[in-house]
Image: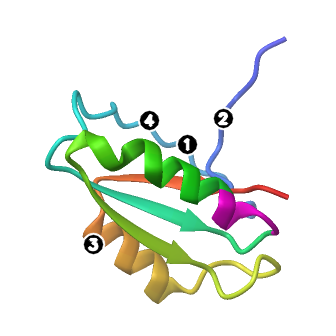
Amino acid sequence: MTYTMRDPTAEASPLMRERLPPPATLANRTIGLFSISKERSSEFLDEIERQFASTGATLLRFEKPTHTKPAPESLIADIIGQCDVVVEGLAD
């Protein structure tokens, strides 16, 4: 069976996007830790933040107002404008 990865942001008109290569190192990079506001996602990101603390990266936290709706465009713009790498917390 063949699987096709699609960008989930526009189901009406699916868009294929190439995966960006990961940076060789996280030193001197900005990592965004993005909680979608589901239960325990902040706890998950707290642990990720502790583990990334020694990488030499700058860590920024972001959070959606609610997990039931898409993130506001202004929040997405902030993340894109400030971060080199993003980790999204989807815990329950």
Q: Amino acid at mark 2?
A: Met
Q: Earlier in the sequence, mark 2 or mark 3?
A: 2
Q: How many marks?
A: 4
Q: Earlier in the sequence, mark 1 or mark 2?
A: 2
Q: Which residue is mark 1?
A: 16
In the image, what residue type sits under mark 4?
Arg
The residue that disc 4 covers is 19
Q: Is residue 21 left or right of residue 39?
A: left
Q: Which residue is mark 3?
A: 81
- Give residue 23's quadrant in the image: top left
Residue 28, position as x, y percentages in the image = 14, 49
Image quadrant holding the N terminus, namely top right
Instruction: State how far apart marks 4 and 1 are (Cα).
Output: 10 Å
Residue extending furthest top? 1
Q: Secondary structure at mark 3?
A: helix
Q: Main secondary structure of the magenta part?
A: helix
In contact (CB < 8 Å): disc 1 and disc 2: yes
- How far apart are the two marked residues, 4 and 3, measured between alpha carbons? 18 Å
* Quarter residue 65 falls in: bottom right
- Name which of mark 3 and mark 1 comes first in the sequence: 1
Task: Say whether disc 4 or disc 2 marks the residue closer to the N-terminus.
Answer: 2
Which residue is labeled 2 in the image?
5
